[in-house]
Image: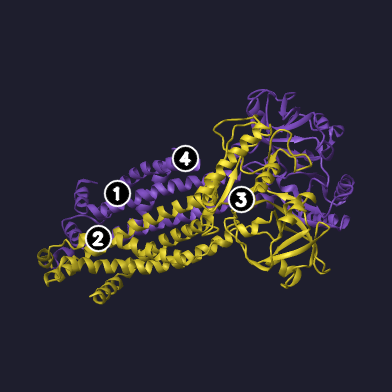
Amino acid sequence: MFGYYLDLALRSLKRNRMLTALMVVAIALGIGACMTTLTVLHVLSGDPLPGKSARLYYPQIDPQDMDGYQPQNEPPLQVSWTDGMNLLHAKRADNQALMTGGSVPIQPEQSSLEPFYDDARYTTAGFFAMFEVPFLYGRAWSEADDDGSARVAVLSRKLNDKLFGGADSTGRTVRMEDVAFRVVGVIDDWRPNPHFYDLFSARYGGEESVFVPLTTAADLKFGRNGSMDCWGKGSGDNMKTATCTWLQLWVQLDSPAKAAAYKDFLIHYSQEQKAIGNFQRPPNVRLRNLMEWLDYAKVVPSDVRLQVWLALGFLLVCLVNTVGLMLAKFLRRSAELGVRRALGASRRSVFAQLLVEAGTVGLVGGLGGLLLAVAGLWLVRRQPVNYAALAHLDLPMLATTFLLAVGATLLAGLLPAWRACQVTPALQLKSN
Amino acid sequence: MDIVPILSTLRRHKTTALLVVLEIALTCAIVCNAVFLISNRLERMKMPGGVAQHELIMVQAASIGQQADAKARAREDLALLRQIPGVTAAALVNEVPFTNSSWNTSIKLDPKQKLATLNATQYYGENLLQTFGTRLVAGRYFRDDEYMDFADIRNNEELQAKVGSIVITQGLAEKLWPGQSPLGRSIYLGDSSVRVIGVVAGLIRPSLFNGDASAQWSMVFPLRMDTGNASRYVLRSAPAERERVLAAAAAALRKADPHRVILDKKTLDELRDDFFQGDRSMAGLMLGVCVALLVVTALGIVGLGSFWVAQRRRTIGVRRALGATRGNILHYFQTENFLLATIGIALGMVLAYGINLFLMVHYELPRLPAFYLPVGAAVLWLIGQAAVLGPALRAAAVPPVVATRSV
């Protein structure tokens, strides 16, 4: 029966090409716009570390003085060197790392390559295991390297290709800011998006070329990037004693019980610091997990959400348009439907026949919408925004496109089909 | 034109008529808000920078390794840059408009205040105001002997207290002391205070992280930067010379210190373009959606109009046979469309207002100005009339003889 309905549908659609084309184009435009914007939203609000993110937490404490104190305020978004190091060395979590971003001049040994600046991450040994960074060669540095401010570095695959032609460079030397560093490891391609562990530099598409111990970077006064908030005496020249928050602390807590215990620990730490006079404010701590932190930091640009609303509105208009056109088309065939009814077709089968026709329009419209979405995403990738490179259609979104297109058109076909199968066969036969 | 017969006909096509009304209403509501968003973005892109926009270029250069004599290096660099033909001014500064990288601080008007008054940006650099080409509206710029080295005061609270003067923007002055002269008044930064000696018409903050309302909250300090603590050189030249000066400046800086990397070199126009890129593409996207919406709606009206005309061929023939002129038939369909459009537009206005309320809550947008509604209505009326013209003309062309055929 389905084949027959399909045949009928195609005949009917062919009979009125302009109207069919109009419906298909309207659906395609609406679906194309929706899928482009939804794909961007989907990519930008994704989980950067699936399977691990629920166990990663971003502790916040409030070390500021009473200047500007308001009880309802959120604690600072980052931690100071003193607190960061205290919490790191307390080792109360299953794993922990303290970090900040920076930019370092890299001086290749080859004379053919000019010195260049590249993005760096200054962090501690726990970073690599906690974030499950894949290693191509070698391994992460050790905690002893952190403590000793060792001149060691981990390179990205891209930088390793550039400097060492992709060879295993562990044990070799790379010069940065006139200092020789020993390469201990090379990581494979690793680009979590959003750049969750440091939202104070590029939020998407951020990628560090070189990793060095935070203590080493601080000793050598490597240039840092990102945001810094100070109070009291402020920064001065020595970041280790500065009353500024400028570092990100991440901890891994494997169970909710451990997370609750860690939160208590943060409160105790704040009380203790207040007791010895380092803190002045009452304890004010937060312990958000990765996805909560991204949500709190409003990582998805508001323009992207606005675009989704706009596209949904557009799709709605396209659908209303299709409902109207389909209704007109179906009602115009009242005579034909009357004959079918008179010959014994039940209301149900007429209804099914009309829905098949609507579904066919939806399917073709969906295909068109998919092409438009691919074109739309290509346009998005050409925009100079930091998330541009991420705008690709993935399999779930592909399936969603078709479901949305066919579902929406079937929904749009319901009313016209229902109206059309209400015809009284006798009346229609008579009028002809 | 009598509208009673039209209404009675529409009553027999309730569902279809309702769909046309709904489509027009939705289009009206979305287009009104989208056009409003576009105009907001375009307005934002015109935000004044307060500087000689078309005459400035920026070169960012960083030296590798620790600087032995950063102050001397900066003096030499600037002397070299000023020798480039066409360069009328040069400065080494800590921050540049439209770069999204800024130094900011909270300020108070009274040291005993518990909460800070506001957060403003700090511009440092010898000769900065003259090079940027800001417009002085009151007081004066810094004298040469007022400048101190940032490297010296950075870790010395005693010296910090000696930085006595500051130039601020009119926007900041108006915010701090509405309606009063800011000259001679004090601003407190931490424990030290500075006195306002000059006011410039405008100078935009390098990054607008606190919202557009604080875009002009800028302060300029008499501090001299060196290559150890600043990397951005700003040069001023005639607009036509910029490209040449840009290349010459980068070459001169490389030559003066081969142990140095040029990180960025751009005209201020390019920086400004990049800065507002998001607004530009958003406006373009909205415009595209608006056009697509109007086209889809117009085509929908054409489609339904054609259908109605075909359906009523016999009725039209009868009317023509009974004496209706072609003009009567044409007007009938035009009036019908006008009626539907009017109902749709009325509904659309309410919806437009609702969408605007939603955007005001979630996207901090201002209220939709009232004049958008009549303009939106006029546009939709025109589109409706244009779309229905074809089907209506076809209806008018139906010959009276149709009435006698069939049956």
Which chain comes out yellow in the rendered image? Answer: A
Q: Which residue is mark 3?
A: A250
Chain ID of residue with mark 4: B
Q: Quadrant of the C terminus of chain B?
A: bottom left
Task: Kindly report which numbered mark, 3 or 1, lies closer to the viewer in this rendering.
Answer: 3
- Vertical placement of B116 versus B224: above or below? above
**Residue located beneath label 2 in the image:** A416
Q: CA distance from mark 3 to mark 4?
A: 36 Å
Residue type of the residue flagged with mark 4: Met
Please tell me the numbered disc located at residue B340: 1
Q: Is residue A325 visible?
A: no
Q: Are marks 2 and 4 in contact (CB under 8 Å)?
A: no
Q: Which chain is mark 3 on?
A: A
Q: Position of residue B31 (x, y in %)?
A: 43, 49
Q: Is residue A406 left or right of residue B32?
A: left
Q: Secondary structure at mark 3?
A: strand
Identified by mark 2, the residue type is Pro
Task: Report crowding for label 1: few under 14, some 14 to 19, many 20 or more residues within 10 A (C-alpha).
Answer: many
Residue B260 in the figure: left or right of residue B276: right
| Residue at image point 75% right, 48% down | B56
* Most foreground residue, B149 or A320: B149
Q: Give the Cα separation between the discs numbered 2 and 4.
A: 37 Å
> Of marks 4 and 1, which one's residue comes earlier in the chain?
1
